[in-house]
Image (cartoon, helix red, strand yellow):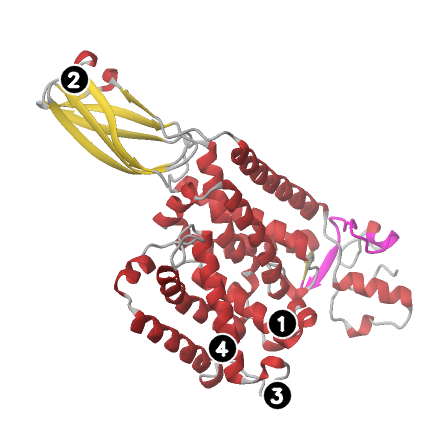
Amino acid sequence: MTSDKKDTGNDDASKSNSSSDGESEEENASPPPTLLIWFTRLVSGGLLVLIVGYLVYLSRVDDVAPEFTITPKFDEIVQHESHFALPVDIINGATEAVTNVKVEIVFDGVSRTLTLPLMGQGETASIEVVFETRPTPEALETMVLAYQAP
Amino acid sequence: MTAGKTSFSRMSDQMPHSLLAVSSFDRRVEIEGQTDYLWKHEVRELLRGFAGALFVALPLLYTLEMWERSRNIEEPQLLLILLIAFVLNMGYNSYSGFKAGGTRTNLVWDSVLSLALGAMASFITLCITARIELDTPPAVMVSLIALMIVPTSFGASLAINQLGARDGEENKNSIAYKRLGEDGEKLLATFLGSVLFAFNIGPTIEPKLMLAKVGSWHALAILGFSVLISYGIEFTARFNNMDDNRTGVLAGRWLCTLVCYLVSLGVSAGLLWAFGYIGPSTPPEMWLPWVIIVGYATTLGGTAGRLVL
């Protein structure tokens, strides 16, 4: 293989009838990749293996029926003039997504209901409910009224 | 060996172009009239693939239904979708790819790179738009990225077609054309064009809403118009320099249009299944008009595929 020929895919002048020159020309038209591309290929392959592997793992995990953890954050209550906003975290502990999760939070006879359109598996939704008096743990009730499984 | 502008790789000089051959970093090549270090060409091509991924898929990365469907699709189905996406990417790379000059194509590795570029484009976009946050569960994150990989990788595999001009002769030199012949290439182009064009519509709820109002006559009208517009675009409007000396079983214009329409309907049904809208238990009076409605989009995409790819 000569080494001082210009490396081009369509260089007619570089064409030769000899087999060795034919090989070099073919290689020049389609040179092998550098280590940069090999590195990128390996990282890409590894990334895809990770994604596929994790999906395979998820598919083999035992199903957990929809169950919700509702956590009011009393230490993060914010007062807006005469109203009190209570942050609440709702966690979907199931291994599947649920839609239209209807949550009811009752304090001192006052009910607040809201609907969460979509919760993926293990996902947390953060909401705020507003009451006219400061909510306390003793008088607060939380529940999930309904949800739609896929 | 001379160093500098016209030097070649030492390793390439010493060994034949095997599967594991490597060019050195000081190798310079001329690609599409531009002489530069090979690694610089490669970086540009990766960036081109990344840009192609975003050009095609950004609307879907911004689509609520895609976020929802990714959470609802079962993992085995998602794995099957990824496998199909890999095969489709091989098809797109056989036409286009993200590498300049139509050289150095390796369908398997290029498709792996397209999928990874799609994953990166999806991950970055979903992070900066707060669709993925630090407290996002890994299962949700992986499912979201796995589904988004599909359109983004298609964009990467079609980067040259999107972002650079290719003429008809170059397309006739494509791997797909050489391997499949005229009929096979036409059907593949229909299939790939249908998937690419209708992937933006398949996951959305709008076709289902249309279904509520679409009766038998509407469905027949959509079917008829889809066939007519497909024929008109390909054979009457003459968007490109159409070859009138067509050969193969599908040389007849109407036969070609009808067979390709059936392929497009198949793609429509496949997309609706992939997004979990229809399945074996779906009654025909529901899935048939639904397939025809989405089939309008896949037919247009398939026709465009036959003209552009």
Q: Chain of mark 4?
A: B
Which callout, 4 or 1, points at the residue further toward the start of the chain?
1
Query: Majority secondary structure of the magenta segment?
Result: loop
Establish whether labels 4 and 1 are both on one chain.
Answer: yes
At horizontal 78% and vertical 49% (from top left) the residue drawn is B20
Establish whether labels 3 and 1 are both on one chain.
Answer: yes
The mark closer to the camera, 4 or 1, is: 4
Q: What is the three-letter code of the residue carrying label 2?
A: Pro
Q: In x, y percent, where is residue A78?
A: 19, 21
The disc placed on residue A135 is 2
The disc placed on residue B292 is none
Establish whether labels 3 and 4 are both on one chain.
Answer: yes
Position of B21 with respect to B39 (left or right) is right
Q: Is residue B33 magenta?
A: yes
Which residue is identified by label 4?
A: B258
Q: CA distance from mark 2 to mark 4?
A: 67 Å
The disc placed on residue B245 is 3
Establish whether labels 2 and 4 are both on one chain.
Answer: no
Q: Secondary structure at mark 4?
A: helix
Q: Is residue A10 magenta?
A: no
The mark closer to the camera, 3 or 1, is: 1
Q: Chain of mark 1?
A: B
